[in-house]
Every structure is written in C-alpha cells, then in structure tokens.
Image (cartoon, rainbow, N blue to C red):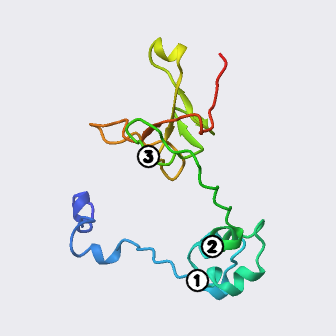
Amino acid sequence: MAGRPLGALRPLVSPYSPTFLPLYRPLTFQPRLVCTACSCSDDFWCASYCPVCASDAYCASCSCLTSLACRDKCQRCKAPASPPSACVASGGPAHGRRCIFPFTYLGVKYQGCAPLYGGLSNVYSPVYWCSTKVDINGFHIRGPFTNQGKYVGYCDHTCPKVNFVF
C-alpha cells in the first residue's frame, strides 16, 4: 500500500451520485395522531387536530379554564361576541357603515371614535373618526393603495368618543 495515492485506497463517491442517494434519503415527517392516546386538555397537537376533542360529549364535561381543546373548540367556552355597535358613520368615505370598537391604529387601542388631527380647523371644531373594517387582531385596515381612507367613517353625536389630554 505504500506506493498507492491516498485517493486510490477506496473509490470516492459523491453524496449526490445515484449510488449514494438510496442510503441517505431525506426523512419525511408524517405525524400520526392517535386520539385514544392523547390528552385534549394538555396536548397541543391533540387539542388542535383530534376530532374527539371537538365532540359534544367532550365539550359537555371539559373545563374552560384548564383545557386547551375546550377553550378552542367548545362554543360554551368561547368569549361572547361584543354587542354590535350602534354607531354608524355619518360621513366620510365609509358613510353609512357600522363603526367597529375597539380598533387599534398606530399602536393605540380606541374604545370609541378617535379625534382626527390635521390642521387648525380641527383644533377649534374637532372631527372624530372610527374604523369600519379591522383585521382579525382588531387593527384598522386602511384600504387599497389608491384609497387609503376607504374604511374611515366620521362620527356624529350618537357615537362614543375618546378624548385625549396632552
């Protein structure tokens, strides 16, 4: 062996060659959920994907405070929907649409119509606005690029207002 070059001891096989690939196939993860072996209360995967955790029998006896599946799947544990707002936009681009409270805009959560700032006229005669469309997290949706105020409605005296003191 003294006269052979180092690479000649064994053939060099690329990890991407057809002879090498069957040895190192990528692993594919296929989770198998066995509902009889999981806990709807403590196991996130079971609470999310097991049909037993959404059944009427389970929902009748689960604890809304401690069970993951119960809070997510059972109707009796979900938070009651907030009553619809009686405030309707009396002007602006979203005239006639229902105002949605609370809404978040620029990091501030508004429980009522927000003052619209923009010029000296608003200092003496304040105009209040509300959001008429929010996303799933309650953030105000501005509208398309060409009409960013599309979902802004102006509030009248019948709507709740938020006042800030600076």
Mark 3–mark 1 Cα distance, whole angstroms, equals 42 Å
Mark 1–mark 2 Cα distance, whole angstroms, equals 10 Å
Query: Residue 43's quadrant in the figure?
Result: bottom right
**Side of 68 relative to 136 (left or right):** right
Label 1 secondary element: helix
Q: Which mark is residue 118?
A: none
Label 3 secondary element: loop
**Placement of 86 over or under 27, stated as above or below:** above
Q: Label 1, on which residue?
A: 51
**74 or 25, nearer to the observer:** 74
**Residue pictured at 24% horizontal, 64% vertical:** 14
Residue 110, percent across and down? 60, 37
**24 or 136, nearer to the observer:** 136
Q: Label 2, on which residue?
A: 73
**Residue pictured at 59% horizontal, 39% vertical:** 159
Q: Which amino acid lies under the numbered mark 3 shown in the image of this protein?
A: Gly
